[in-house]
Image (tube, rainbow, N blue to C red):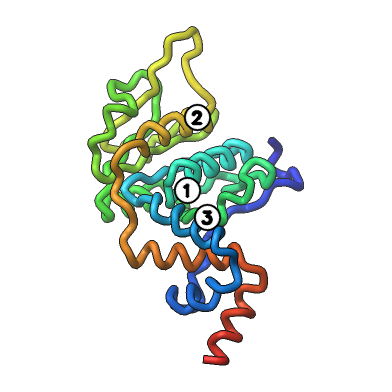
Amino acid sequence: MRADDPDVIEIEGPPPLSHPAEVVIEALSPVVTPERRRRIQHVVSQRTDDLVVVLDSISDPHNSSAVLRSADAFGIQTVHVIVGRYGFRASRGVSKGTHRWLDVIRYETPQACARRLKDEGYAIYVAGMGADQDPEGLREQSRLAIVFGNEHHGVSPEMAELADGTFSIPMRGFVESLNVSVAAAITIQTLAAGTRAPLSEARQRALEARFLMNSAKNADQIIDEFIGND
């Protein structure tokens, strides 16, 4: 997919909540259906920060979108992005709006990304051909960041040097590699299955507030009116 395709958008954010989570939840809960509120609460309860995805200079918006979609589908809340030459772009048609439900954190350099991950206690493993480790072997890592590189050049040398190890997906055919979005989907599903620590209570409430804002029309206006009538 071309980066200048009209379906392609730059991905950033999300912006921080403009009001405390409890205020947002109290103001917006009455304006969504009970079914929608329950769906939001269920999704939030299934999210984790113990497993995060890192995209190192992904260039194809189709691939970016597909990885975001997989992250949302399998309960990953945060995607760290080292922006490439063309920024970090996704396709509306492929992502189906999933970027609105995720925390997408952008970095200019691999060093900045790795430093933050290390400070937050993550072990960093990069995808690469011929690695000794497969995704199944990483399941015991309590806090894990999995890195996928550029479609043509793979993970940057800087990120590879800062990583704790590498992994690859076992294959039985003649092909030696998978499309990055396919590799990411297989790896995320493998590692997200089973026990992953849920988000903290405060983080869950903040996400519930944000998801309500994504679900309600004129959310800011409703919140302002709620505060004004309080």
Asked where in the image residue 147 lies, by quadrant, the reply is top left
Give whichever of 146, 154 is nearer the camera.
146
Name the residue that disc number 1 marks.
81
Tell which residue pokes out farthest to the right in this image: 6
For the residues labelled 2 and 1, say whether their Cβ atoms are less than 8 Å apart: no
Instruction: Kindly identify which residue carries mark 3.
Output: 101
Instruction: Report how far apart the C-alphas of labels 1 and 3 lie in the structure.
Output: 16 Å
- Viewport quadrant of the N terminus: top right
Left or right of 182, for residue 195: left
Counting residues from the N terminus, which is met first, the one under dot 2 or under dot 3? 3
Q: Secondary structure at mark 2?
A: loop
Query: N-terminal of the two: label 1 or label 3?
Result: 1
- In-front residue for pair 84/50: 50
Q: Quadrant of residue 4?
A: top right
Tell me: 49 left or right of 215: left
In this rendering, the answer to whether 129 lies above or below 213 is above
Residue 190 percent coordinates (x, y): 38, 31
Image point 45% across, 63% down: which residue? 207
Relative depth, front residue between 100 and 39: 39
Q: Is 28 placed above or below 123 here?
A: below
The numbered dot on residue 153 is 2
Q: Earlier in the sequence, mark 2 or mark 1?
A: 1
Asked if 194 appears above or below 217 in the picture, the reply is above
Q: Amino acid at mark 3?
A: Trp
Determine if residue 162 is in view.
Answer: no
For the point 24% across and 39% down, the residue is 141
Horizontal side, residue 226 vs residue 8: left or right: left
- Label 2 is placed on what type of residue? His
